[in-house]
Amino acid sequence: MFQQVPMVEIDGMELVQTRAILNYFASKHNLYGKDLKERALIDMYVEGMADLNDMVVVFPGHPPEEKDAKLALIREKTINRYFPAFEKVLKSHGQDYLVGNRLSRADIQLVELIYHLEELDPSLTANFPLLKALKTRISNLPTVKKFLQPGSQRKPLLTAEAIAEARKAFRF
């Protein structure tokens, strides 16, 4: 449709746009809430993660002289803004998951973000016991556990070399 990636062919459709793809998969696999209110909360949490996730994803592409400052900003935002907000949500209702006490797209994306952040600084979750427990809970689900094994399809953060290669390939 928009001549871009990502594009997924599924159920007779060609879906583009990351959020559309993720929403479709989440709906198809009952990870997108049981009603409109739960979907709104899931969307709010996912969108709340987006800014931090964007900072993490582009981090490897920054010039070496900017990396210390960018990493310090990621650490500051993680520890003082994002992780406290999600820790508070989990604490406020005393349930195992962010929404409706069942696994959702928001939980999965938060755990993936935690993994990426820990690749940059393993100490970031030290003062967030409920987030660590969420990560452990989700990481121990059989399909997730398999996905996290060495040799699986999970990809680490992009390296500076991979970003340079993508820039060359896509001419940007």
Image: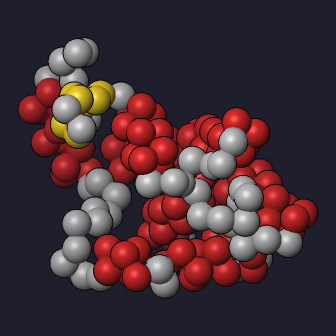
Outermost residue on the left side: it is 169
Q: Nearer the viewer, residue 81 or 33?
A: 33
Q: Quadrant of residue 4?
A: top left
4 left or right, relative to 143 = left
59 left or right, relative to 35 = left
Q: Indicate the colouring scheme.
A: secondary structure
> What residue do we see at 36% from left, 50% from top?
60
Q: Vertical placement of 129 versus 1: above or below?
A: below
Residue 149 % position (x, y): 30, 82
Q: How many marks?
A: 0
Q: Nearer the viewer, residue 80 or 139?
A: 139
Q: Quadrant of residue 75?
A: bottom right
> Does residue 153 appear in the picture of this structure?
yes
Residue 171 % position (x, y): 14, 23
Residue 81 % position (x, y): 77, 51
Q: Nearer the viewer, residue 170 or 38?
A: 38
Outermost residue on the top side: it is 2
> What residue do we see at 41% from left, 39% from top?
24
Q: Quadrant of the N terminus?
A: top left
> What residue do we see at 23% from left, 39% from top?
10
82 left or right, relative to 165 = right
> What residue do we see at 29% from left, 66% from top?
154
Q: Vertical placement of 125 versus 62: above or below?
A: below
> Does residue 73 appear in the picture of this structure?
no
